[in-house]
Image (spheres, rainbow, N blue to C red):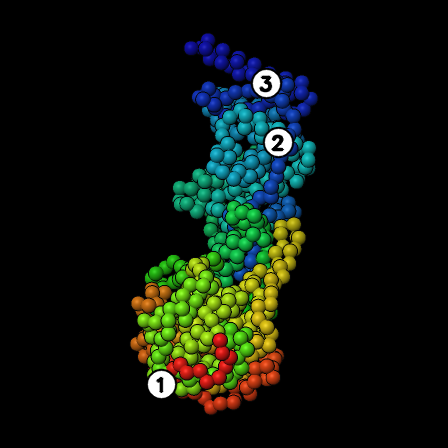
Amino acid sequence: MAERGEEQQQGTAQKIGRLIAVGAAAGVLVAGIALPAVGGAGLGIVSAANEVNLKPEELIEPPPAEVTIVQDARGKEIARFYEEYREVVGLDRMADVMKTAIISIEDDRFYEHGAIDLEGTVRALAKNLSTGGVSQGGSSITQQYVKQVLLNSADTEEEQNKALEASYARKLNELRHAMAVEEKYSKDQILEKYLNIAYFGASAYGVEAAAKRFFGVKAADLTLPQAATLAGAVQDPNATDPNLGKKQRARLLERRNVVLDRMAELGKITETEAATAKATKLGYKGTSLPGGCESGKYPYFCIYVRNEILNNSDFGKTAKDRLRFLNRGGLTIRTTIDPAMQAAADRAIRKWVHASDHQVAAEALVQPGTGAIKAMAASRKYGRSKARNEMSYNVVADAAHGGGVGFQAGSTFKTFTLIAALNKGMKLNDGFSVGAGYTAPSYSAFRNCAGEAVGDPTHTVTNDEGSPGWRTLQTGTWGSVNTFFMTLEQRVGLCETVKVAKSLGIHRSDGLKLQEYETFTLGTNEMDPVTVANAYAAIAARGQYCAPMAISRITDRDGKTTVYRPKCRRALDPQVADAAAEVLSGVFTNGTMRGVGGIGRDAAGKTGTTDGYATAWFAGFTPDLAGAVSVGDPRGSQKYKLTGVTVGGRYYGSVAGASIPGPIWKDTMLAALRKVEPRSFTPVDAARFGGCGASCRPAPPPSRDEGPVDGTDAEEPDSGGEILSGPEE
């Protein structure tokens, strides 16, 4: 036994001597490397530089994942996205004691050696050989940086495993890269890069994020015990993650004290300073990580922005590219949301609908002429808690932006039939007599855009109450008369009405094709407030349609800024849009919103109430701002209708477009436009469209859309079918 032990000691000495000799022969302090155990054979030594081709090999260094910051239109932070919570800072923004601590424990000869610390490697090798295992590491800070870069660059699990595997090939590859890094950067630059890429545990990447997460301070303000704690965490951050429990905190405390002892041993601090620091508590605060839509101030808009990037090829060719761009890019994203307008929408909704109600109200505000989304609000908080009645999806937007199936838009779609009639050359006072019910004369009375006959002569569309009468484009719209619009749609064409809607960006919230049936004009398709508000914004912009826009500019980590312009096109003849605005402005003075009233400036809009009071809407606009409000029950609007309900503490026999959505829109606009100078609509071209405006005729009887604020039921005029004026087919 004694002879065998003596032989082992001689073998160890020979190996160490060979390692030193090769290093000297190579002319650099890079010639040997201590390797972890492979196949149970213990540690091995690659002892000849020419045998392993130890030449510098360039390291591809993609920037480490950084936090992306989302800002409102004024530049105030509203959310953060990240795959790894990291804030990159310069070495001058890291406390000197932090640099000293990490060098002391990880690589105390860092400023003296090259890519490999030969002395440290020999020391680690001797220690590991004597213990028969790996009890002391020999990697330099440069080698550790290389390892982190390779790990962070790995896209697949296989690549990650390869970056961590215990093999000669990996260690040699790291060493070649480390040699190149040492040639490329100064020691200070390498240390800065390492401290910004290292993982410290508790989901904190880089020393700045770790300082904030662990102690609630910046890296520049770390104290001795705090710096020693973070320096101790990098060796095995999962085992010492203080966020995981008491055992991990105890290990971290022990590791901190090891660092302090090492600093004292190296003369970086005194024994007294070490003892004093060791006597302090760990002091872990677990500061919450900022970011994420759920914790943000504007969660629904935040979700919209996130999905806009993930779905838009402007931000990356593939979905994977776009996700990396968002979560790893270190971007600053300036958005279009206006805090004052958002606050106006939030207040208005809270006034009329409670967060605890089964029903949910949602509102979007859009700027005409740009498509910029200025607000997205809902009566419920975003989240996944059923106990707190939270919404788990974006109720303000379509499915492509995190939303759901939406709610049927009801009579807000009558506006598209009105525009189709104006396109056909009908004048404001053209009209016809309608009765209490409408039945398609034949299947071919309505054809969709595929040319298919979709009329239904077996189904009769009715108005709730009222008497038959004569209605014009103006009075039929003001009273929101179902039978008038069914007849009008038959005359101008279902496909023409659908084309108008599509030209204004109308698409189903669930992403499916629009349902093109005879009741299209009654709003049987499910919509979301952003889409409807944006369509009405195009009318306000005199027919200029602009795609919904949530992002105005993005600044990357290098300070390069990309500005995103509105994407607009001509959707309507400006004079047709003016005529539509003229008709819709009468909804406030002579129509379904007259019980609610106007907002003291030019405004136009349309109430929307679906069959049986399943959902209620209001969509309207001024020259400066458009908005749409929906109210429905997300448990199922057809099953849980808006009849005999208490919403916002008020009882309603039935909820119509002017009962809740209209007042929300009005209160929002009054506050949102308080500091905006009023502008007027462009006057209607009387020579082309005739009429004398909203004050021409006495008000028609109210329809069910009016829905007085006190919740009592409203009435609606009847209509029938004889055409008295207007162009013939």
Between 697 and 536, the one lying in front of the other is 697
Which amino acid is tagged 3?
A: Ser
Q: CA distance from mark 3 to mark 1?
A: 100 Å
Badge 1: how crowded within 10 Å, few (<14), some, or many (20+)?
Answer: some
Give the residue number, with chain letter if any, for mark 1: 466
Q: At which x and y percent is residue 174?
A: 58, 30
Badge 2: how crowded within 10 Å, few (<14), some, or many (20+)?
Answer: many
- The disc at residue 388 is none
**Nearest-to-viewer mark from 3 and 1:** 1
Sequence order check: which comes first, mark 2 or mark 1?
Answer: 2
Give the residue number, with chain letter if any, for mark 3: 47
Q: CA distance from mark 2 to mark 1?
A: 84 Å
Which amino acid is tagged 1?
A: Gly
**Nearest-to-viewer mark from 2 and 1:** 1
Give the residue number, with chain letter if any, for mark 2: 177
Q: Is residue 189 left or right of residue 612?
A: right
Q: Is residue 568 left or right of residue 281?
A: right
Which amino acid is tagged 2?
A: His
Q: At which x and y percent is residue 502?
A: 51, 65
Quadrant position of the N terminus in the picture: top left
Could you tell me which secondary element the residue under label 3 belongs to?
A: loop
**Is there any visible trace of residue 489 in the rendered image?**
yes
Badge 3: how crowded within 10 Å, few (<14), some, or many (20+)?
Answer: many
Could you tell me which secondary element the residue under label 1 belongs to?
A: loop
Residue 719 against residue 420 in the figure, above or below: below
Between 594 and 494, the one lying in front of the other is 494
Residue 553 against residue 457 in the figure, above or below: above
Q: CA distance from mark 2 to mark 3?
A: 18 Å
**Is there any visible trace of residue 110 in the rendered image?**
no
Residue 373 against residue 723 in the figure, above or below: above
